[in-house]
């Protein structure tokens, strides 16, 4: 009976992929897909490392890693991460992050960093911010399959100087208004459906909110996408 229920959820999740639904429903149905895969994994025989069952180990390891990754993004989306915010200078941080990207992004992608001279420091968890930016860049890479331009920008929010704006902008394929509206919904994806896909931007949005800020998306089909993290400036943070 359990497989029948999960099968029904699978069909429901697929039919909802193009429908406007609440994020909570997205999360619940998407999580059911993840549980289905993990239940299938639990049907495998447990591995005793001394038995030499390397084939079963190889099958189990990636699922365990994906389970860990799923747990991490759900925690981020639910704003339950253990964050340790600190003062973080924007220019050195973005320069360091960009240097790491050179080893991972398509060599045909040009990366630039632009930080305003008077940009104040952030008050944020550095490791969690790097993870969030990595997720955003991953989406940008998918939108630029043949390379392109990627800009990392930092500036004081001129409309609300309590915040620093970090923008990640690409010149990829862009998104329609309908897709952009749902891009941060948990488990929503325009890629091939998978129980573990579609959580990147929802985790980023959760991180931003837990940090006292927010995420916004600006995009147009054929013109690229800009994702903005508005995060607390150190002078306005609550220590």
Image (tube, grey):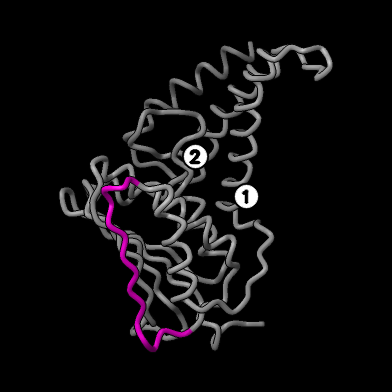
Residue 177 drawn in magenta: no
Per the image, label 2 sits on a secondary structure element best described as helix
- Which image quadrant for residue 117? bottom left
Image quadrant in which the C terminus is located = bottom right
Image quadrant in which the N terminus is located = top right
Residue 68 against residue 3 in the figure, above or below? below
Per the image, label 1 sits on a secondary structure element best described as helix
In-front residue for pair 81/155: 155
- Which residue was labeled with disc 2? 25
Q: Which residues are magenta?
A: 106-120
Going 64% across and 24% down the picture, which residue do you hit? 38
In-front residue for pair 49/76: 49
Q: Where is residue 162 shown, x and y percent of the image?
A: 47, 84
Residue 113 drawn in magenta: yes
- Which residue was labeled with disc 1? 75
Crowd band around label 2 with a 10 angstrom C-alpha radius: few (<14), some (14–19), many (20+): some
- First along the sequence among labels 1 and 2: 2
Q: Where is residue 9 shown, x and y percent of the image?
A: 51, 23
């Amino acid at each position: 009976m359990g497989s029948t229920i999960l099968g029904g959820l699978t069909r429901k999740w697929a039919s909802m992929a193009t429908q406007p639904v609440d994020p909570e429903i997205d999360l619940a149905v998407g999580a059911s897909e993840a549980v289905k895969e993990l239940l299938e994994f639990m049907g495998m025989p447990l591995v005793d490392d001394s038995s030499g069952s390397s084939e079963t180990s190889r099958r189990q390891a990636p699922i365990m890693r994906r389970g860990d990754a799923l747990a991490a993004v759900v925690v981020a989306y639910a704003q339950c991460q253990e964050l340790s915010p600190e003062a973080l200078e924007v220019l050195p941080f973005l320069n360091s992050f960009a240097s790491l990207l050179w080893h991972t992004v398509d060599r045909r992608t040009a990366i630039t960093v632009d930080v305003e001279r008077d940009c104040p420091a952030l008050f944020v968890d550095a490791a969690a911010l790097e993870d969030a930016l990595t997720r955003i860049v991953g989406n940008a890479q998918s939108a630029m399959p043949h390379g392109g331009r990627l800009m990392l920008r930092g500036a004081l929010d001129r409309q609300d100087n309590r915040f620093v704006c970090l923008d990640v902008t690409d010149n990829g394929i862009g998104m329609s208004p309908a897709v952009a509206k749902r891009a941060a919904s948990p488990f929503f994806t325009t890629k091939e459906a998978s129980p573990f896909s579609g959580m990147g931007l929802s985790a980023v949005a959760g991180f931003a909110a837990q940090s006292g800020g927010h995420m916004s998306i600006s995009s147009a089909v054929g013109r690229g996408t800009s994702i903005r993290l508005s995060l607390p400036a150190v002078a306005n943070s609550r220590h």
